[in-house]
Image: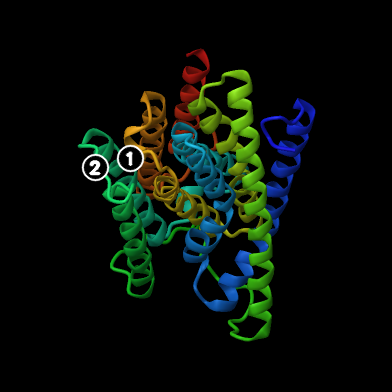
Amino acid sequence: MSFATAPLGALAAIFAIAGALILICGLRMTGLADRIADRTGLGEALVGGVLLGAATSLSGTIVSFTSALDGRASLAFSNAVGGIAAQTAFLAVADLLYRRANLEHAAAELANVLQGVVLMLLLALPILARTGPEVSVWGIHPMSIILFLIYLGSLRLVRDAREVPMWVPVETRETRRDSPEEPETGGQETRALLLRFAALMLVMGVSGWLVAGVAGAAIDRFALRASLVGALLTAVVTSLPELVTTLAAVRRGALQLAVGGIIGGNTFDVLFLTVSDLGYREGSLYHAIGADDLFWLAVGLVMTAVLTLGLLMRQREGPAGIGLESAALLGIYGGAVGLQALL
């Protein structure tokens, strides 16, 4: 049975099961990532931004790549950038949960600030590609390669900043230090944690393929706008791990892991565009998208700028019990969703 000919009830069931698997795997990954950070000594911000961020983004990667292979450029692109906007809004939801202080204040960490700046750069480059000449080498736009190289360079930048920081946040009574709860080890127990983590990633990858198939069938069957399905359906469903991992990390007191997981996951999500451009064989992915897709890219860029400003300003607490940046993030995302729904 193919997705195109499957009954509507079967498609809904597949979508619900895949979404549930993504949610469950993401929840279990949080505890594993926290323990891996402690046992390897890499720290919550780095593990959250790289390992957890990439792992929880796997299902979204599969959605974008599969959609691009099917020639659905708008779905592939909007799934990537729509997920960035949704996940940034999730961090504001986590700020509501953490009642002791503004989350961005308590989770002060240079690695997260650096990744926020890198993310803004990565989000600006697709706009440059879209407004520039339509060129491709073996079907790949040069900007896709540049995105990948900048991402790799940013990993080394974050690692070096952690080892030899040139900027240190001011300590306050609300600042939460990244203190390992388990001793560093390099033996069999750490390998077992990594294997369990890899198994969960495999399940998430298969679930992402199912979500992409159902979304494509829904677009064709009901003549839906691909950008709307990508930004508000597949992006939100595949971003559920970021929501549960962020909330779980905050409840565990792993604040750097929570913030780092969102920003690092968003940084990794930009690579969806590189993967999608590889899968899209009809030319440059950046020149196959429309204004709606660029709209969600701009929303993600604005929200990232607001979040990074919040990490730098470190407001202790806003008038509503959360930081002003969190209130702004919820307002921007809600306004964007409302505008797209009206259109």
Residue 171 occupies quadrant: bottom left
**Above or below, comparing residue 301 to residue 253 in the picture:** above
**Above or below, comparing residue 276 to residue 196 in the picture:** above
The amino acid sitting under disc 2 is: Val
**Disc 1 and disc 2 in contact, CB within 8 angstroms:** yes
Q: Which disc number belongs to residue 25?
A: none
Label 2 packing within 10 angstroms: few (<14), some (14-19), many (20+): some
At mark 2, the secondary structure is loop
In the rendered image, the residue lying farthest to the top is 342
Query: Label 1 belongs to which residue?
Result: 284
- Can residue 331 be seen at all in this image of the molecule? yes
The amino acid sitting under disc 1 is: Ser
Apparent side of residue 310 relative to residue 70 in the rendered image (left or right): left
**Above or below, comparing residue 18 to residue 151 in the picture:** above
Residue 93 position, x and y percent, is 58, 39
Residue 179 position, x and y percent, is 55, 71
Apparent side of residue 52 relative to residue 138 in the rendered image (left or right): right
Mark 1 or 2 closer to N-term?
A: 2
Identify the residue shown where x is 48% and y is 38%: 76
Residue 243 position, x and y percent, is 61, 45
Query: Label 2 belongs to which residue?
Result: 135
At mark 1, the secondary structure is loop
Identify the residue shown where x is 78% and y is 32%: 10
Residue 137 position, x and y percent, is 27, 50
Identify the residue shown where x is 59% and y is 77%: 39
Q: CA distance from mark 1 to mark 2?
A: 7 Å
- Can residue 168 be seen at all in this image of the molecule? no
Identify the residue shown where x is 43% and y is 57%: 108
Q: Quadrant of the N terminus?
A: top right
Q: Looking at the image, which is closer to me, 153 or 58?
A: 58
